[in-house]
Image (cartoon, coloured by chain):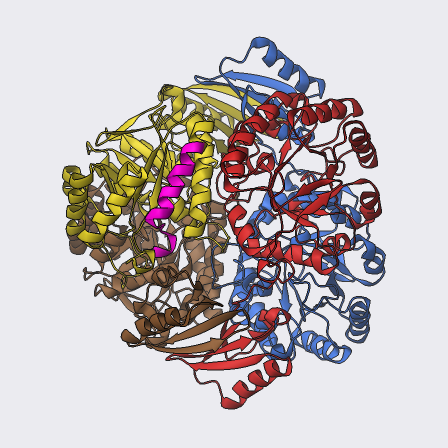
Chain colours: A brown, B yellow, C blue, D red
Amino acid sequence: MIITLKKGAPQQEIDKIIHEFESKGLAVSMIQGTDYNVFGVVGDTTIIDDRIVSANKYVENVTRIAAPYKKANRLFHPEDTVVNCGGVKIGGQEKIVVMGGPCSVETKENLMTIAQGVKEAGGRMLRGGAYKPRTSPYAFQGLGKEGIDYLCAARKEFGLPIVSELMSIDKVDEFEEHVDLVQIGARNMQNFDLLKAVGKMTKPVLLKRGLSNTIEEWLMSAEYIMAGGNENVILCERGIRTFEKYTRNTLDLSVVPIIKNRSHLPIVIDPSHATGDWRLVESMALAAIAAGADGLIVEVHNDPEAAWSDGAQSLTIEHFKTLVEKGKKIAQVVGREI
Amino acid sequence: MIITLKKGAPQQEIDKIIHEFESKGLAVSMIQGTDYNVFGVVGDTTIIDDRIVSANKYVENVTRIAAPYKKANRLFHPEDTVVNCGGVKIGGQEKIVVMGGPCSVETKENLMTIAQGVKEAGGRMLRGGAYKPRTSPYAFQGLGKEGIDYLCAARKEFGLPIVSELMSIDKVDEFEEHVDLVQIGARNMQNFDLLKAVGKMTKPVLLKRGLSNTIEEWLMSAEYIMAGGNENVILCERGIRTFEKYTRNTLDLSVVPIIKNRSHLPIVIDPSHATGDWRLVESMALAAIAAGADGLIVEVHNDPEAAWSDGAQSLTIEHFKTLVEKGKKIAQVVGREI
Amino acid sequence: MIITLKKGAPQQEIDKIIHEFESKGLAVSMIQGTDYNVFGVVGDTTIIDDRIVSANKYVENVTRIAAPYKKANRLFHPEDTVVNCGGVKIGGQEKIVVMGGPCSVETKENLMTIAQGVKEAGGRMLRGGAYKPRTSPYAFQGLGKEGIDYLCAARKEFGLPIVSELMSIDKVDEFEEHVDLVQIGARNMQNFDLLKAVGKMTKPVLLKRGLSNTIEEWLMSAEYIMAGGNENVILCERGIRTFEKYTRNTLDLSVVPIIKNRSHLPIVIDPSHATGDWRLVESMALAAIAAGADGLIVEVHNDPEAAWSDGAQSLTIEHFKTLVEKGKKIAQVVGREI
Amino acid sequence: MIITLKKGAPQQEIDKIIHEFESKGLAVSMIQGTDYNVFGVVGDTTIIDDRIVSANKYVENVTRIAAPYKKANRLFHPEDTVVNCGGVKIGGQEKIVVMGGPCSVETKENLMTIAQGVKEAGGRMLRGGAYKPRTSPYAFQGLGKEGIDYLCAARKEFGLPIVSELMSIDKVDEFEEHVDLVQIGARNMQNFDLLKAVGKMTKPVLLKRGLSNTIEEWLMSAEYIMAGGNENVILCERGIRTFEKYTRNTLDLSVVPIIKNRSHLPIVIDPSHATGDWRLVESMALAAIAAGADGLIVEVHNDPEAAWSDGAQSLTIEHFKTLVEKGKKIAQVVGREI
């Protein structure tokens, strides 16, 4: 951590600051600059709150050199983490996992149809929303527990582990019992009480990146979960908000090599929410595989035009099958399998 | 709601779409364009989900004309809403309310000192965080219930109603009992389960704008609370995320006249979080009053450099007093009082 | 074009507005809504300026249905445009073109070394900046005409057509004479006088997307060039500005399928400027090919650490060769060749 | 400047880096961190290009401590700069200057009417666009030289110095001869050849902030002009691009105290382009004065609905008069005059 002091800071103020760091077991070096004086603070600076340091009126600027996350940091955990989701392994040199399913769980019948299609196309996990985060209070809010039950029935029938979104701490027990991979949605990426709650679960967590969050903030949210004791975190990029109007969000595929460099956690791409448009999903899914992603999570529906939510971004079962076929060939080029 | 169809959509498809809207009690008009055909859908379109309409492959585009919010919309509720917070009225032609207090509640002693300072300076409500949303799991997370107790003690002593942030549904009863104005933080603006929960409270809600949310999304979150039965919502702008690095966030003061035009709810400005820098707080606070805000919420600390969080953006008690003095004069020019 | 009028607009005002559109040869249809009245304006609405329409105090909102660009619009020009750059064809079903070269032209010797490397690796065009847009007036501004001369010498020696950035109208003749593909940089995407000037050139133009511009604005800048008479425009995505700090910009690969859908112009990806980090270039280049790009423009240097500018994002010649090898295999999967 | 090296960088590499800085007259200090080694580079680091330093593969990160601008920096030029625009002084403790006029110059008659209105309302400079940057090639592009002539005629008649936008280097002589304050528009803020050209003019320059540029980039563009020899630069905030859709741009008023802290140059606010909506102009103009701005530039039209461009954001002459009246009272509160 580098701290810039205004020229003219009284020596006694400087001594006070140095003493404070030293009392926390950190070492301090000082550089006399032309217009500023600069401290380097050495040691485990994750315990320091930048904002407290900058409250000092002689402090011009505080810059963090070491990342503020530890458990999620590849520097301290060089081997890839492989996460086991109800028997399906994600990360490292494991096969790329394609997850498919409807935006919302609707009826038992159509979920079964879709699950069968996902299975036959080569998908290995089933996604489906039972509790839905909707911007309008007047929109369909999901089937709730009934939706979870249908997902469990589909899992039993087709052997596909299930992933579904958890929105609230009062459903933690329900998800712990029934769901194989617990999704934290983009809008809850910094719902810290929810992060703490899933940090105590034994089920793995799929942590979506917030709409306007940086990779560092995303890794800090993973750190929250891991600090609570649950180290089975999978990161999921689902598009960020930009000024572009022709897509719902902008898919940031550079996260794939960046996450692999900075962290040991697996990275999965959601091309459906990222684009909001089924016509863009296939090319973005193939690009994600070419970039090195560990998995894909794709919206699939037997009749997108009749979907209860987000039909505009759902692939038909046939289209999903084509996508997996092409994906297999791309995977081979980059030394992976699907 | 305007729906654009691609040229060449089969008549039977067009009839199906029209029939679907009409079955929901909406009227449909059609315009034959050169390159597109366009429908106008007339009636209460808040019940329609745009994304479902756009799932039809012949639909090029869906545009909403009427706002998707009803209860928060001035069109249907022309008079200003005035919200009573433990006896202090906010909104309409009421006096501008200045709230002050520390970022986090720390000790009982310093809270008392600050509360007394806020009171004497002309502040009319006391702010203070007991549960703190922190980006790092290793940072101070707030005193919890103990913090609420200290706030209650300060209220008793100085007669200042209190405002504090609620982060989780399991604390709803605690806040219903003790807090006068329940704050929903920026990162929880789209935590829909929390919005539903405060929608059932009897205490008024201070809803902060999310870091990257539009005014429409913010009003939709207010709509969530109001749709649950709690119509006492105060909106609070606290800065949005932009590319600028010299401030923590960018204060968007144009929300003041916009909210007054589109909604009947009161609008309060938080210049402390918006800038993250105490040196910018006074000028932004005065600007907010000049723009027509109904209130200010300002971080104040008896010793900012020793604050347990966000000292960098806290005013001293003396500075807060100066701010209120100048604010009174600006208020007069725009026909208000503090 | 859809125009929303406030309820209560006087009939005479409505008649005036209708008359104005009709006098321009446009047809007008009207829909009576519950809270608003809505006009549809049918015909060539590219001649209408939205902002003039919204100046009317009874107008609530103006929404464009048809795209504001014509010459760049696939709707009116269904076949792919193939652009010939000094003998190398880009677009349509032509081979994917990989362009390589240094950020800035430095010495003749190292340019020759790099050009030979690019050629041997399978690159088909040579890039190099002679006039450099630098954010600091104190940074190296490029060799100018000398740089163009070196590029011409390298072209002569290795048969690679050259692409270089034009920053100012006073160099148009120089570029018309010497350069095969004239690059307009991101910061000049809306330098309209420069767009008008290249619109009169006979050489093709590589139009980079601005750092914060939408695809529609980008296509409008292409329209400027085409409206001037030069229809040989290639679009180039080079990353957009987002809140992310771990990359210089965020590469938006969804532009590839979108441009192919909305326009007939070729689309090329620049993974070097998009990421600003050579470690991310290969994976983003492969992803671009998987997404369907018509070409790549990549920074290559014989000794990146000694480069006079942007060495941090330059590949070595060896790395560039590997990239082209892998790219060939990805291209095959998506039905293309390099 | 702080340079972070990966642990494990060979000593000889470290020595090479140190030697390179020392050969440029800079001093180097080193701090041994736990996970990184850190250099401090002391001296005039504006001559160093960060991107060249980061090209070294052992460099993890480069952080600038001192600002990269010198001539625009208050640190080296503590007194306020006051700029004389054809007799009207802007900056320091001078009166706040209100500039008014149409978006585009249209006819001589209506310009005269507007100029008279601006004068009588208390405006002290006349604005008007003769060369217009338009996103569509099919929109009105301005009257050109004829527009400048009308502005000169209005200046002669009413004694108001004129401000107008220069878009291209081939009009520099025309502006040098006729215009009192040369505006560089937001889209040209990083048109570096244009900045160099106005850097050689004797007339003062009004430099608008780019739509997505940081304050640091803006000051670097001012530095370009000043480095060329023209130190009479006035900064103008005109709104930045954000996700908000209810305004055209988002006015960032925090620039006012920031510019006053970091630079000695005057700062002027354009509430018309910032909001794009005349209904928001007055409150934003008053807020700007409360925040401490040195001037306002406001669009005024005798008949906004008939304006040839941007009528939606123009005030009537009467409304402009009211704004100036209220502004005078706000100015008094903050110790200024209009």
Quadrant (top left, top right, bottom left, bottom right) of the N terminus of chain A: bottom left
Residue C212 vertical position relative to residue A6 in the rendered view, above or below: above
Q: Is residue A88 left or right of residue B328?
A: left
Label tally: 0
Residue B128 percent location from the top left of the image: 26, 47
Based on the picture, tell me whether residue B324 belongs to the magenta stretch: yes
Query: What residue appears at the point 60 percent right and 27 percent down from the top-left corner?
Result: D312
Query: What residue appears at the point 43 percent right and 73 percent down from the top-left corner?
Result: A39
Q: Nearer the viewer, residue D334 or C159?
A: D334
Residue D328 percent location from the top left of the image: 56, 31
Residue B253 vertical position relative to residue A60 in the rendered view, above or below: above
**Majority secondary structure of the magenta segment?**
helix
Q: Quadrant of residue A111?
A: top left
Identify the magenta region. B311-329
Residue B3 percent location from the top left of the image: 49, 29
Residue D23 vertical position relative to residue B64 in the rendered view, above or below: below
- Asked whether residue A190 appears in the rendered view, the answer is yes
Based on the picture, tell me whether residue D321 belongs to the magenta stretch: no
Query: What residue appears at the point 44 percent right and 77 percent down from the top-left corner?
Result: A30
Residue A255 percent location from the top left of the image: 44, 62
Q: Quadrant of residue C301?
A: bottom right
Q: Nearer the viewer, residue A84 or C167?
A: C167
Q: Is residue D52 left or right of residue A127?
A: right
